[in-house]
Amino acid sequence: MLTPVLPAPTDARLPYSPGVLACGLVRTLYISGQVGIEASGAVPASFEAQVRAAFRNLEAVLAAAGMGLADLAKVTAYLTDPADYAAYGALRTELLKGCKPASTLIVAAALARPDWRFEIEAVAVAADH
């Protein structure tokens, strides 16, 4: 259903797929930007805690649609500090649990609130029931 598209030469060690092809009868879920807000409404101070919270929020939207991380076709992540790039790379690898959706990373001057340091949006594709 979702097939990575890897043009030659592509480094297989990359933590993302250059392209992802969705075939067959599918459901497509467009996920709005998820930020690092805890269920309590609190915004953690640390970048790592915000990334973890944003991924939990992303997974909750996926689950509500009957989907999971393996259904992610594309993610776009936004950082507000380029110094967080390496930390994000390590967290992304851990939190995506081996999934390699097509990906874009943007360093933005700011997000909608000054205390938000990370946001992630996604597109997921799964077989139609």
Image (cartoon, rainbow, N blue to C red):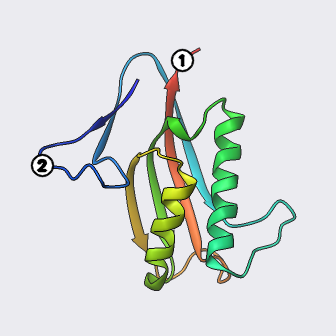
Quarter occupied by the C terminus? top right
Name the spot of residue 48 as percent of width and height, x first: 63, 73
Q: Earlier in the sequence, mark 1 or mark 2?
A: 2
Name the spot of residue 71 as percent of width and height, x first: 51, 35
- Residue 86, quarter of the rendered image: bottom left
Crowd band around label 1 with a 10 angstrom C-alpha radius: few (<14), some (14–19), many (20+)? few
Compared with 28, 52 (above or below) is below
Compared with 14, 2 (above or below) is above
User: Contact, CB < 8 Å: mark 1 with mark 2?
Assistant: no
Mark 1 → mark 2, Cα distance in angstroms: 33 Å
Considering the numbered disc 1 on the image, is that residue within a helix, a strand or a loop? loop
Q: Nearer the viewer, residue 75 or 85?
A: 85
Crowd band around label 2 with a 10 angstrom C-alpha radius: few (<14), some (14–19), many (20+)? few
Instruction: Please tell me which residue is depicted at 53% across the width and 81% down the height of the picture.
Output: 110
Name the spot of residue 14 as percent of width and height, x first: 31, 55
Give the residue pinned by disc 1.
128
Q: Is residue 110 left or right of residue 51?
A: left
Considering the numbered disc 2 on the image, is that residue within a helix, a strand or a loop? loop
Compared with 3, 118 (above or below) is below
Instruction: Please tell me which residue is depicted at 66% across the width and 29% down the height of the picture.
Output: 66
Q: Which amino acid does label 2 sit on?
A: Pro
Per the rendering, the mark at residue 87 is none
- Residue 111, quarter of the rendered image: bottom right
Quarter occupied by the N terminus? top left
Instruction: Please tell me which residue is depicted at 79% across the width and 64% down the height of the picture.
Output: 38
Q: Residue furthest left?
A: 8
Nearer the observer: mark 1 or 2; the answer is: 2
Q: Which amino acid does label 1 sit on?
A: Asp
Number of numbered discs: 2
Q: Which of 44 and 108 is in front in this view?
A: 44
Instruction: Please tell me which residue is depicted at 71% across the width and 45% down the height of the picture.
Output: 60
Give the residue pinned by disc 2.
9
